[in-house]
Image: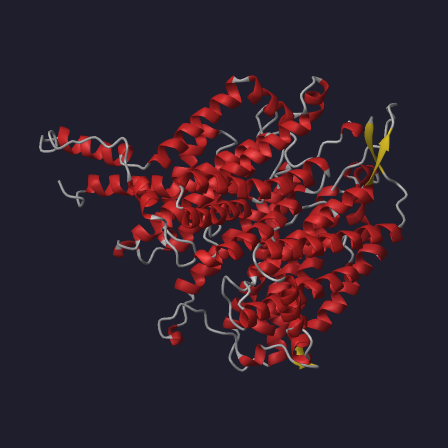
Amino acid sequence: MLRIARKEDMTGLRAVGVRIAAVLLALLASGLLILAMGYDPREVVRVMWSGMRTLKALASMIRIAIPLAMAALAVSIAFTMKFWNIGAEGQILMGAFAATAISSVLPEGTPGALRILLMALAGLAGGALWALPPALFRAAFRTNETLLTLMFNYIAIRWVEYLRCQLWKDPAAMGFPQIAPIPESAHLPQLLGVHIGWILVLVLAFLQWVFLRRTKKGFEVRVVGESEKTARYAGMTVGRVLLFGVLLSGALAGLTGMVKLNGTAFVLAERLAGGDGFTAIIIAWLSNLSAPVILVVAFLFAAMKQGAGWMEGLAGIPSALADTVQGLILFFALGSEFFIRYRIILESRHRTERKEAHP
Amino acid sequence: MTDTTPLMVLAVFLASAVRYSMPLLVGTLGETVTERSGHLNLGVEGMMLMGGAAGFVTAIRTDSLVLSLLAAMGGAIAGALFYAVLTVTFRANQVVTGLALTLFGAGVANTVGKGAVHASTPPHIQAFFAWQPLRPDLSAIESVPVLGPAAVFLRTVLLEYNIYVYMAVLLAVVLSLLLHRTRLGLHLRVVGENPASADASGIRVAATRYGAILVGGALCGLAGLYLPLVHNGTWVENITGGRGWIVVALVIFVRWSPLRAMLGALLFGALEIIGFKLQGFPQLAGNPLFSQYIIGMYPYIITVIVLVANSARKKGGWRGPGALGLPYFREER
């Protein structure tokens, strides 16, 4: 009889091999799908590549990668606790909203550095506060946090739409529904052709790694993720650890919104998050929640987005094809996890296996 | 009797709420079937888009309604199949797989739909959906006082719909009976509630879940098809505009019941149009609670309240399918 058992001893190298094989298979499947939809895969690759190889394109890709990586770092903290925070999209928006709100009440002559600092703090607070209710309800009633954080995304989107079209509609925009842009002094300074968000991302990735692997709080976060029972047994207050981790996750997502606002968008709109909060979940998952890998995967996703834009503009190939390819890669990666975690055994005797929660 | 009397304004409003609720209702029925088996499929938006694009492109290419319906179901089933293989057989994370399906489905649909952006629904299919099979001729009693307006009111609210609407209502009733009155429905519910005991009593858990996910997908495809083929008459990029997520909210709001889904979809459908209607009332203009954007939040806020209230119940109340979102390991029970 065919039987499936959990693998305990998959070496790191073999796991990487399985994942790479999955991505290669996904690319092969993508090629076939592109062919089936009536486009030439070689042409797609050629055009995408032509949009990536200049220095300017590199800078643009890094700009796209910054919020993706930051948001992925944010959700991976919550995911480490098996708290399925899919509300990064809303937390990004509320971070940007809080930053805009602070900026609008500061006097005009506020020095740029101070304004940026206060906006960053507001971004952290905005994102954390937006993650707070789902965390509280989960801790108090075990309310399904996936669905809660999902709903909070759409409340945030409508809220910013309301601000844009009514409450904060800029009279200077000549009837166009738009919120007033943030002052130029609040724009993030450039370093090597890209705003300094890229340094922030590198620092945050390092800090996140240190936090999860080297600090007591980070250890608690990981234990809660492994097993709430163990955590309770070890004397941790699971609710408090959960709350702390989720607030940290939300705060980072909120900061992502502020960096997007002050780095590239300069104006708050409901499109500001632009799906980054959802893509971040995929990136975090593909990276196995590891901070250094997140940086690499976020850059690859950004490259694909950049190439897709060129595809549409240059060759008239729909940029939606890039979403299809990303989706396929994810499908194959999700499938490959099975072959990393389980082995298939041909036998008839039943053996009990260690019980373990599955993500 | 003209359409400007308050009664008729109400009737017309209710009727358009019913029309707006259709993709929500059919999608909710589909997702309810899926979730009752214990699988939370967040790919509704993607499946609706895939079904809508496949069905609409087939309609304009072949001019055939039957082929269009089959293509809509087939397109969405293809998406659901990815989800089923990954989450049932490979035990992948349901949340991430659902998100991947939304990304993938939107990508495929917007690529396929590109060629249909300027096309419109073929005339005879338009005519078919303009047909109101149950509309009675009231010219004989229309001028009778009280009775006449009442009859016209009821006709507008209940009997002036196309066949899609009646089929959707019928589907809700049939699914409810199926879930609660048949052995198949019982099996489905047990699988979603407690797969280990279902397995122990000889129910085929994986097969039941595959079935529920694929049926759910097919219904999402039909829900998606309504938008380009009947409602808009043409395809636009991302035509569902977040309705797939409203469906996910609705399933919770109606607490996994096909009958309540009709009321829930009607309420959310009404909320979708009421914002525009209220713009005609200047006395409400300054009140943010009646702003169309704030009203747009209500479905999500209501769902949050229902979710929290549901989970805060004391023991004994049903909180939804017990195994929702959890993979089943026969080896680890």
**Residue B208 in view here:** yes
Residue nearest the observer in this picture, A287 or A130: A287
Q: Is residue A346 above or below residue A247?
A: above
Counting the numbered discs, the total is: 0
> Looking at the figure, which quarter contains the C terminus of chain A?
top right
The residue depicted at 86 percent of the width and 32 percent of the height is A345
> Looking at the figure, which quarter contains the N terminus of chain A?
top right
**Residue B309 in view here:** no
The residue depicted at 17 percent of the width and 46 percent of the height is B4
The residue depicted at 42 percent of the width and 46 percent of the height is B62
Residue nearest the observer in this picture, B124 or B33: B124
Q: Residue furthest front?
A: B62
Q: Can you give x and y, in whole percent of width and height, for residue A75 in the image? A: 68, 54
Q: Quadrant of residue A229?
A: top right
Q: Is residue B21 left or right of residue B15?
A: right
Q: Quadrant of residue B21?
A: top left
Q: Can you give x and y, in whole percent of width and height, for residue B76 in the image? A: 54, 42
Q: Is residue A215 left or right of residue A266?
A: right
Q: Is residue A102 left or right of residue B227?
A: right
Q: Can you give x and y, in whole percent of width and height, for residue A34 in the image? A: 61, 57
Q: Is residue A352 left or right of residue A55?
A: right
Q: Quadrant of residue A257?
A: bottom right
The residue depicted at 61 percent of the width and 71 percent of the height is A118
Q: Which color scheme is applied?
A: secondary structure
Q: Can you give x and y, in whole percent of width and height, for residue B46 in the image? A: 55, 48
